[in-house]
Amino acid sequence: PWWIYSSNVDGHFGRSRCFEQTICEIHGQASEFRCSYATGRTQGNMRQGALWDKWNEQVESSATNEECARDTIPVSYERVNVECPHCALPARPNVLLFHDTDENVLKSISDERKRYQQWEARVEEEVMANDKHLVIIELGAGLNVPAVRNESEEVFNDTLSSLKTSSSTGSVTLIRINPKDAGFGEIK
């Protein structure tokens, strides 16, 4: 069993059906779009200001519905202007931008993270209970956006810490493949 934890938004792994249930794209996927109706909200409240007021008026007057929140909109390179097929509001890339509060995008990413966390817990339990061997292979995760790197080290350290206090003969190995930034943070 494997899982892909990626900060890339290119949708590379999603192009292959064998990965569709085993990938966590923590910043979303640029090859999918979503209805932008939730962009004008933060923590359920409407954003304030002249531009946001105008946007929120447009959202309120459109016919948004459950499909706007649920569906992703496939895009192609030929289609530049993408709109929601359900309410005709503009669509936006299904990508988490810095300080993004779009509940529509956050929910899809959160769902993937939950599935990943459940898988991770099961694997760590297998290592402990059944003397299994966990190998984490990290490819090209650099220092500029260290989320994947941090996750690899966290899983490694959590598993190693548990192994040290148990009678399990399981093991954990982190292989970092990065020609520029191959060093490790704190190993506990």
Image (tube, helix red, strand yellow):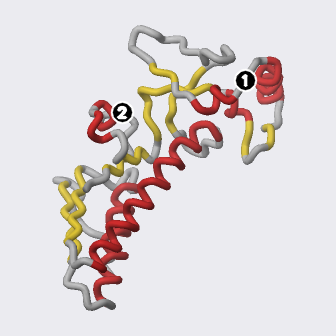
Is 9 placed left or right of 71 in the picture?
left
- Residues 149 and 13: in front is 13
Q: Residue at x 33, y 91 (%)?
A: 165
- Residues 183 and 188: in front is 188
10 Å crowding of disc 2: few (<14), some (14-19), many (20+): some
Q: Residue at x 78, y 38 (%)?
A: 47
Residue at which label 1 appears? 64
Q: Residue at x 47, y 53 (%)?
A: 113
- For the residues labelled 2 and 1, say whether their Cβ atoms are less than 8 Å apart: no
Marks 2 and 1, how far apart at CA: 28 Å
N-terminal label among 2 and 1: 2
The C terminus sits in image quarter: bottom left
The N terminus sits in image quarter: bottom left
Is 18 placed left or right of 40 in the picture?
left
Q: Position of residue 23 (x, y in %)?
A: 36, 46
Q: Position of residue 51 (x, y in %)?
A: 78, 26
Residue at which label 2 appears? 10
Q: Amino acid at mark 1?
A: Thr
Which quadrant of the structure image shows residue 16?
A: top left
Which quadrant of the structure image shows residue 44?
A: top right
SS at mark 2? loop
Q: Amino acid at mark 2?
A: Asp
Q: Residue at x 27, y 39 (%)?
A: 18
Establish if 178 lies above or below 121.
above
